[in-house]
Image: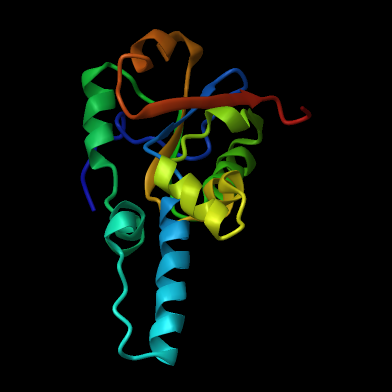
Amino acid sequence: IGQATNEEIVYRNTALPGDIICVSGDLGGAYVGLQILEREKAIFLENPDFKPELEDNAYIIGRQLKPEPRADLIYSLRQAGIKPTAMIDISDGLASDLLHICTQSNVGAVIKEAQVPIHTVTEQQAIKFRLDPITCALNGGEDYELLFTLHPDDLDKIQGLSDVYIIGSILPPED
């Protein structure tokens, strides 16, 4: 819940071909954290004396149990003089939430798999579960990072911000 002037509000339906696609933070951790919790629960149900050791995975378990919306980034963008052309929080997974922007803006998109930020612990644990880390990042959800698009003129401004990653671009709908 918050307040903003009409000029400050950013919608999902205002992305334009040529815009840059960005995300904050890293993706897939909440989903992999859930997999760890589900595994530990199953072991506990079979053996109530079992004491899980979760410390090595505290980061990704925390991503699942206590997600934190990225309100801090909104202020960083404002201070840098950047207003995204479109924005959404990543609660359903990168692929699904990017589809929301594309559908509502009547545009297409391309993302570069190698540029999708995945934390090292997320990647390692996904592989232990025999999951593809990029699949976890694209479809996992509950990361509560921000997905947003920018006019190309803001490229220099965004590169000065930490914890923001350029992952692709918006295309015309037929592409």
Q: How is the image coloured?
A: rainbow
Quarter assignment of residue 6 = top left
- Between residues 6 and 96, which one lies in front from this camera angle? 96
State the quadrant of the C terminus.
top right
User: Quadrant of residue 62 in the image?
Assistant: bottom left
**Residue appearing at x 34%, y 36% in the figure:** 9
State the image coordinates of residue 43 (x, y, percent, origin top left): 43, 82
The image shows residue 88, relative to residue 35, as above or below, that is: above
- Of residue 53 and residue 105, the one placed in the foreground of this image is 53
Estimate the x, y position of residue 68 in percent, counting from the top left: 27, 51
Where does the image place residue 4, in percent across and percent down from the top left?
23, 39
Residue name at image x 29 percent, y 48 percent: 69
Q: Give the residue at x 48% y 66%.
A: 35
Vertical arrangement, residue 175 with respect to residue 42, above or below: above
Q: Judge whether residue 96 can be spotted in this image.
A: yes
Front residue (pair 45, 112) = 45
Q: Kindly give the residue lying farthest to the right in the view shown.
A: 174
71 or 36: which is nearer to us?
36
Q: Position of residue 161 (x, y in %)?
A: 30, 20
* Residue 5 showing in the rendered view: no
Count of numbered badges drawn on the protein: 0
